[in-house]
Image (spheres, rainbow, N blue to C red):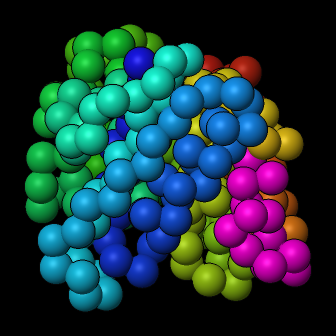
Amino acid sequence: MLQVRIHGRGGQGVVSAAEMLSIALFHEGAHAQAIPSFGSERMGAPVEAYVRISDKDIELREPVSEPDVLIIQDPSLLQSMDVFSGLTDNGYVLINTSRSIEELGIQSQIEHLPEGHVHCLPGTELALEYLGRPTPNTVLLGAFSAVLGSFSRESLGAAIHQKFPKPVAEKNIQAADAAFSLIKERMKEEQPC
């Protein structure tokens, strides 16, 4: 079972990202479960969502405490909470930022991870370019697809179409495709962050 924890703030589409990720995985024939977690439900408050992925039925219903994948939609959370808690030793991290690991000051939190398991992506900038809004959720899902290969771009596109009306869906698919291509290019060049 692969466990994903998504960190962000209210208004960034954290819960929607978890839902679309689970739908994309359903399209691939996997079993998936999306679980939202709310503290304060105000705009800008920290929000987490969880996704479990398996080839068998999933019976767990609690939050993900030992994630295999972290998606961090808001890098300001790196300084205000321990987003890395419980991350498995072979885990992956995807951070919405145009800054380097050194600039973020997180070297000690990720030093145990294998090389190539931490990826940075200017998700908000891509969202603004393609969507005209600072909501990086679909952008980061496109990057997730590139890093882990758990689902195809077509399955992500189908999930996005289920979530949004056609004109909005098409823009989100373009943004996700741009993120996918950028991450693949960086992986070839071995420059994840």
- Residue 118 occupies quadrant: top left
On the image, the x and y values in percent for residue 106 come to 23, 39
On the image, the x and y values in percent for residue 66 come to 22, 28
Magenta includes 164? yes
- Residue 132 occupies quadrant: bottom right
Q: How many marks?
A: 0
On the image, the x and y values in percent for residue 23 come to 64, 48
Q: Main secondary structure of the magenta part?
A: helix
Q: Nearer the viewer, residue 132 or 48?
A: 48
Residue ID at (27%, 66%): 47
Residue ID at (80%, 79%): 165
Tell me if residue 192 can be seen: no
Q: In the image, is residue 189 above or below residue 161?
A: above
Left or right of 38 on screen, residue 75:
right
Left or right of 74 on screen, residue 109:
left
Residue ID at (23%, 68%): 38
Q: In the image, is residue 142 above or below residue 161?
A: above
Magenta includes 179? no
Q: Nearer the viewer, residue 132 or 17?
A: 17
Magenta residue span: 156-169
Q: In the image, is residue 115 above or below residue 10?
A: above
Tell me if residue 126 can be seen: yes
- Residue 26 occupies quadrant: top right
Residue ID at (41%, 18%): 1
Left or right of 192 on screen, residue 78:
left
Q: In the image, is residue 108 above or below residue 143?
A: above
On the image, the x and y values in percent for residue 146 come to 68, 32
